[in-house]
Amino acid sequence: MTANDTASAFTSLYGHAPTGVWAAPGRVNLIGEHTDYNEGFVLPLALPHTVEAAVRPRTDGRLRVHSGQAPDGLTHDLAVGELTPRPGGGWVGYPAGVVWALRDAGHPVDGADIHLNSDVPTGAGLSSSAALECAVAFALNDVYELGLPATALARFAQRAENAFVGVPCGVLDQMASACCTEGHALHLDTRDLAQRQVPFDLASLGLRLLVVDTQVKHDLADGGYAERRAGCEAAAASLGLPALRDLSLDDLDTALAALPDATSRGLVRHIVTENDRVNRVVALLDSGQVRDVGPLLTESHASMRDDFVISCPELDLAVDTANAAGALGARMTGGGFGGSAIVLVEEDAVDPVSAAVHGAFAAAGHRPPRMFPAVPGPGARRLR
Ligand code: ADP
Ligand code: MG
């Protein structure tokens, strides 16, 4: 996939050349899961996989969108003045939602022709949705000379997904796609979007981060996410806190004793310990103790499996098998109930660990997982 291919496909579709081509990446989150909507900390890195958007503005109030990956194969033609949120409305809601969110805030986006082309696996927990939104948001920002910073574009992308598509996600995915940089993980405080680029160069240390895409998505995914979010918000309210981010590890036991049921205790324990793990991982990366990150990844997985209850048999099998085969640590990444796991591994253990995971999936009768190394790439940008 190249920017030229995406531009040529645009030209054949619409009969004129695009103004430019923009790209925005998918991501893996090294650690900090479900902490974003609790106003806590996350540590994503951008994948080399991107959604590309070839875009040309229009002055007649029409929005035309096409995607090389959409099963419908259609070019959708919409009136920008009539865009209204439509939860469950399909893939078109992602690009249309970005146009709607910008216009709703008063930005003069009068229409566009858009062609999308992507190599980010969809629904794999690698954030194809935010990559799509950010590619469109960055393109519109340039072609309409809106002058918005990356963090504002990430917020518009999140608003598109929350309000237009109807997915109650936090800001992790959009900020990762918008703000990650090559060779770094992004240490982000999701409360105020304060950020720091943390050098993350595993190759020079003889290490790898493997992504294991289980290729499963369980039915629970959408409802389960919304339910966890509502549970966290209810627990924070019952503890008299603005968000679970405001509960410190020191006060955790007292808070747990005040909560009425095991489900909410699990939610709270995961968020508080996970925020602490993010900051410990950052400290280890800063001090060059990268191998010591492994056990924290595995602790994070156990916390999501046992306390937050968002894992599934395929993810547990990937994590347990990788660890048993000599990985330094592993965890599921993304919203849960399927999708992908990440595995921190010595370079010379990549082959045995991969073979063990493949073998275990075959023995359990699961679909073969897809595995590839995650090397931190750049965030959203104009390609041409
Ligand atoms: P994830 O973001 O983890 O990949 P989501 O369920 O949040 O999973 O988003 C996946 C959805 O995003 C797809 O079902 C589709 O509607 C939309 N999408 C992602 N990439 C594309 C693409 N290249 N073309 C059209 N729609 C896409
Ligand atoms: Mg998504």
Image: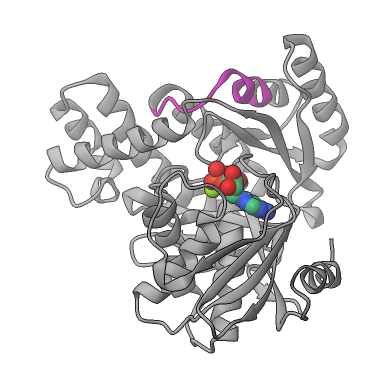
What residue appears at the point 87 percent right and 37 percent down from the top-left corner? Answer: 348
Q: Quadrant of the C terminus?
A: bottom right
Q: Quadrant of the N terminus?
A: bottom right
Horizontal side of 243 relative to 91 (left or right) equals left
- Residue 156 vs 321, above or below: the answer is below
What residue appears at the point 55 percent right and 22 percent down from the top-left corner? Answer: 312
Residue closer to the observer: 312 or 13? 13
Asked if one can make out residue 141 in the rendered structure from this viewpoint, the answer is yes
Q: Position of residue 357 (x, y in %)?
A: 77, 23
- Residue 27 vs 71, above or below: the answer is below
- Residue 140 vs 194, above or below: the answer is below
Q: Position of residue 128 (x, y in %)?
A: 62, 51
Residue closer to the observer: 95 or 354? 95
What residue appears at the point 79 percent right and 42 percent down from the top-left corner? Answer: 372
Horizontal side of 235 relative to 208 (left or right) equals left
Q: What is the quadrant of residue 229 in the picture?
A: top left
What residue span does the magenta drawing correspond to?
A: 308-319
Horizontal side of 326 relative to 236 (left or right) equals right
Q: Position of residue 319 (x, y in %)?
A: 64, 26
What residue appears at the point 82 percent right and 48 percent down from the top-left corner? Answer: 206
Q: What is the quadrant of residue 380 in the picture?
A: bottom right
Residue closer to the observer: 233 or 227? 227
Asked if one can make out residue 28 in the rendered structure from this viewpoint, the answer is no
